[in-house]
Amino acid sequence: MIEDIFSRYPKKPESLVMILQDIQGAMGYLSEAALERVAEELNLPLAKVYSVASFYRVLKFKPTGKHNVKVCMGTACHVKGAPLILNSVLSKLKIKDGETTDDRKFTVQSVGCIGACAIGPVVEVNEECCGNMTVIKANKLLTRIDKNEKKS
Amino acid sequence: MIEVESIKSALDLARLQQQIRQRRARYRSSISVCGGTGCRAASCLKIRDAISEELAARKLCDTVNLVVTGCHGFCEQGPIVVIRPNNIFYPKVKLKDVPRIIAKSVMEGEPIMELLYRDPITQKSIPCEDDIPFYRQQKRVIFAQNGHISPTNITDYIATGGYSAISKALFEMTPSEIIEEISASELRGRGGGGFATGRKWALCRKSKNPIKYLICNGDEGDPGAFMDRSLLEGNPHAVIEGMLLGAYAIGAEEGFIYVRHEYPLAIKHLETALQAAKEAGLLGDRIMGSNFSFTITPSRGGGAFVCGESTALIASLEGRYPQPSAKYIHTTERGFHRAPTVLNNVETWANVPIIIAKGAANYRRCGSEGNTGTKIFSLVGKINNTGLVEVPMGITLRDIIFKIGAGIPNGKKFKAVQTGGPSGGCLPASQLDLPVDFTALKEAGSMMGSGGMIVMDEDTCMVDVAKYFVEFLYNESCGKCTPCREGLTTALALLKGITEGKGKIEDLEFLEEIAGWLEASSLCALGGSAAYPFISTIKYFRHEYEAHINEGRCEAGVCSALITYSIAPKECNGCGACMKVCPSSAIVGAKKQPHGIEAQACTKCGACIEVCKPKAIIRR
């Protein structure tokens, strides 16, 4: 799989961030072995690969949950109550920001701004954007995903 | 479908344009479905499918043109459908209404009154898109095509005159003439700094280095701003054409578009557009049969705020650790791979084809001296009409907020407007008559920034807003220079203390001192302007800071350490709705009897307020 990703980009340091993003997209996170393989492929020191990867908050070194929940903390969402939504989602799932639930179902992360400011507060679940959120709507959203999972 | 063959001369382009227009003449009307991110969240693609089925069932596919366009700007009204040529505007379209809309508005050209947009102030239904106050007060130049063309279809862009500016430039103008034209237009960079674009290009062109680069900054890390996203999603060819003109003017053969990873749709549309332009001979070797060659590579950024800073962006693009570096030497002299580089943001590039096509003199007619053209703002927050608005520079804040935005919802009072993102400031009601341009905003203690405009009402706590921005910057600070790293750490600790009722009045002085260090000694502009959010709020809303410090009171009811939730027994009907939603079981009481909140268990999440119909819950 990693070899497929390498074939999409020129073998240059310029491709580093995009390769890391694609690996995370395919595997859910960046494993140590994957980072080593990237360093080897691009002929970069492993420390350099790690320094770049660890700079970006979106890149993860631990496996994430099945459903990725992003709570937008952009300014427009903030003034419309995003902190309340984040807190209630976290307390419902009993995790901290950026963590994954023990059953590996949910990872929750606050994000800078997803650029859907006009329909804020926004919660993104698995790349699907849900607008005009409230504490209750967000809780219902999670309950629904959980229920669908149990059904299937 | 018209096959676009490789364009090898100006005549080829003109012919193709003619051919597309003739082909389109058979359409008696067109339906444009907004496909921006906001409308997609409101399931606009299902609406598109329903329209498509309905058109097929009525055998209208050959005479009615169905287009999924980029963002129309009025995002909170999504999904939006506009029927042209009469421009009948339908907001919040529902699946069940699709057959009616086709029968009445498409076939007969008549509006359906009850489905139309209703003005929140006059309560009147408005049939035509252009008559809606939100659109009427705007001047859409850069966004002109956004609601009309399909971003994934190059023929749509060509039909509206697209790529004729590069054709004019290649065959009728010299590179220096282009730079002169851009300089004469007085175009200033739309990314925040407001540097004169023509001057930047001239500096780069002067360099003797034969290799030059061009970069489009689509990082747009400002929280609360999304105009670059909408431009890339809705009209990527305009950005590509702008870059072609820039490359021809400065003599670059390679360009990059750096887009945030968080904007998947923008990346997708951009990649489609680049491929189409390449196939049409508008990118690559010997463009349109001339001697000019240029390629554009899209690059996905990691979504860090600091990557919007030019030197950090270049580092990120090169695959290095993205920290800014000192600008003793400008990027126009030594930038990407140490070669001269011109870096402009998405909106700036989208301005370029318009200036070249219509001339600098025409462009200058809009706006004021030194602040020409239009600017796109993302008008969001506590405001009735939220969305993207394009206005002539120099319009007042009041016109934007009260005429276009239709004021504050729910009868609340306006408190402040925040411009310029985390590097900008908050302006109070007394500054509402300020003209919106680079100079005036800076003088008032804010800045233009990339165009976020967040409106706040009486329920917004200004100390909390200042804390929010400082926390954002603290998280995004790259940590390279001490003033930014340590200054923000200290400022955040002070602001947190104030919002928790542990502040001292001397803290305000200390904050002002930190602001001085930040501005004087930070390495890059992000640190240099990091104090604006708290300095502007201390300046205009000092009484709120004092209320937090002296009285331990948050008037807006936001700072959770200073507020408690209680239930007014007289208002409470004991319905139990709050009890059901309370995640911490803090609400007690018997059925049909007034409830109470156990303060120790309450996490202050606010869920009870949302469900309480008699509005018995007090947050104070």
Image (cartoon, coloured by chain):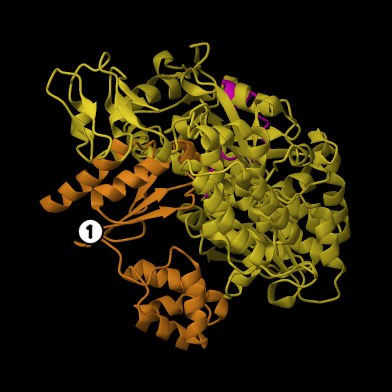
Chain colours: A orange, B yellow
The quadrant holding residue B466 is: top right
Q: Position of residue B292 (x, y in %)?
A: 75, 67
**Left or right of B439 on screen, residue B17:** left
Q: Residue at x 82, y 43 (%)?
A: B359
Q: Is residue B145 magenta?
A: yes
Secondary structure, mark 1, is loop
The quadrant holding residue A7 is: bottom left
In terms of secondary structure, what is the magenta stretch mainly? Answer: loop
Label 1 crowding class (10 Å Cα cut-off): few <14, some 14-19, many 20+? some
Q: Position of residue B23 (x, y in %)?
A: 56, 41
Compared with residue A60, is residue B614 higher up or lower down, i.e. above or below?
above
Instruction: Point out the stretch of residues depicted in magenta.
Output: B132-151
Compared with residue B610, is residue B313 higher up or lower down, i.e. above or below?
below
Q: Nearer the viewer, residue B455 or B267?
A: B455
**Would you say residue B26 is visible in this rendering?**
no
Residue assigned mark 1: A105
Compared with residue B468, is residue B406 higher up or lower down, i.e. above or below?
above
All told, the count of numbered labels is 1
Q: Nearer the viewer, residue B452 or A6?
A: B452
